[in-house]
Structure formats: structure tokens, C-alpha cells
Amino acid sequence: EAQVTQNPRYLITVTGKKLTVTCSQNMNHEYMSWYRQDPGLGLRQIYYSMNVEVTDKGDVPEGYKVSRKEKRNFPLILESPSPNQTSLYFCASSFGGRGHEQFFGPGTRLTVL
Amino acid sequence: AQSVSQHNHHVILSEAASLELGCNYSYGGTVNLFWYVQYPGQHLQLLLKYFSGDPLVKGIKGFEAEFIKSKFSFNLRKPSVQWSDTAEYFCASIRGANNLFFGTGTRLTVIP
């Protein structure tokens, strides 16, 4: 089944404790992206990747890092999480090029205390 | 389109009522517009998209949207909603490579 998977689905952590949220897709997509969803703000893009070893900032990249060492994986790294990063995070992927449909993962709900 | 905006934050309808959710876009060259739906506790799913051609776009689950260039609008419509349409709806445009810019969303509650 074609899908985007994220782990963990739920995470409660404390300020400053490094964490990684994994994202994997099995559709051989070139493009992958991370979004955060906050009430009243919709979804905002954090980082995106056009292909292996090619990443770039989205609208709200502060406090986050990403890497794209393999085509299927695009982990989101929070080196020193803070409470304002408490949010619902979505990973998405698509074939490369403008306008291709993006497929979203199930989301990761992160709480930083 | 460079950005989109949604002005309806929460819409409450009774079953069988007609639905229209507003979405306005700002001009920025090529227009690529989308409507996504997020059912409670689920991930986003694409309802429909507009790139060019017929301005009336048909999507899944009986939804449609009309692109009106003169009004910078791309409103989502459904003639008769069902309880199962209760969800949050997001309008989106593309910026840059394939980066989605989402509106703030409209929560739809359908009362049986």
C-alpha cells in the first residue's frame, strides 16, 4: 500500500531534550516536506526537500533541522525543543515538479513541557 | 497564486443544506489552487485542484469548486452536505517548487 508513515504518532517530552520524528514514504517520491499545524494558523511549511541531499527552508524553519540521506526518509530533528514547538506535525511527499499531488502522513502530535 | 486566505472559521449546517466555503487568492503568476479536507483525527486528503482550463472543477465526494479570476476566488461548494462531511477544510496554493501555502482552515460541523 502506497503511504507516508510517521513515528512516533504521539510524543510528550521536556524542554531541551533532543528528539527526532521520522518520516518514510514508499512511493519513490522525490519531493518531501514537513508542516506544522496549529489552531487558527492552518498548516505552515517547516522544511522541504527536492531530492536526496537537497533541502531548503520553508516558512517556519527556526528550531528545526532535517536531513535527506535516502530518498524514502526525511526525518525532522528538534535539537532543543521548546514549548512553542508543541504542535501537530505532518510529513508529505510527492513526485517532483510543481503541482503534483502531495500525500500526507498521519501526523505526529508533539507536546513539549 | 502566492497565498490564499479563508475567512470562514467555523460553519455549522444542518444535513442536506448547501455548502459554500470561501477562499481568496493573491495574484502571483501561475495559479495552482487546491482544496484539502481533514476528517477528525486523520491526515489531509486532496478534494480537488485547479491548474487551468474549465474553471468549474469537480472533486471527490460530490465537492466542486469554481475559479473566478475576476474575484480572485476559488470557493468550495457542495449542494447537499451529510453528517460525514464534518471536517476541517483547507484551501491551498503553490509557491516555489511544490510548496503548499495553506489557508487557516474552515471547520465545518454538520448537524444530523
Image (cartoon, rainbow, N blue to C red):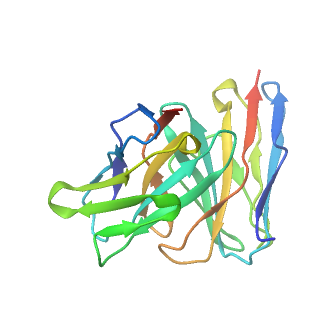
Query: Residue B90: x and y, percent?
Result: 47, 48
Query: Residue B70: x and y, percent?
Result: 14, 60
Asked if residue B59 is positioned above or below residue B39 in the image, the reply reads: below
Asked if residue B29 is positioned above or below residue A82 in the image, the reply reads: below
Farthest left residue?
B70
Instruction: Write the residue at 59% across / 44% down.
Output: B84
Farthest top residue?
A113
When asked about the image quadrant of residue A113, the answer is top right
Q: Is residue A113 at all visible to an observer of this figure?
A: yes
Position of the C terminus of chain B, as image quadrant, is top right
Would you say B105 lies left or right of A81 here?
left
When asked about the image quadrant of residue B87, the answer is top right
Q: Nearer the viewer, residue A23 or B50?
A: B50
Would you say B106 lies left or right of A84 here?
left
When asked about the image quadrant of residue B29, the answer is bottom left
Instruction: Write the residue at 27% across / 63% down.
Output: B67
Q: Is residue B31 at all visible to an observer of this figure?
A: no
Query: Residue B39: x and y, percent?
Result: 62, 44
How many numbered marks are there? 0
Query: Residue A17: x and y, percent?
Result: 84, 32
Instruction: Write the residue at 17% across / 55% down.
Output: B71
Q: Nearer the viewer, residue B46 or B26?
A: B46
Q: Nearer the viewer, residue B89 or B4?
A: B89
Would you say A19 lies left or right of B105 here?
right
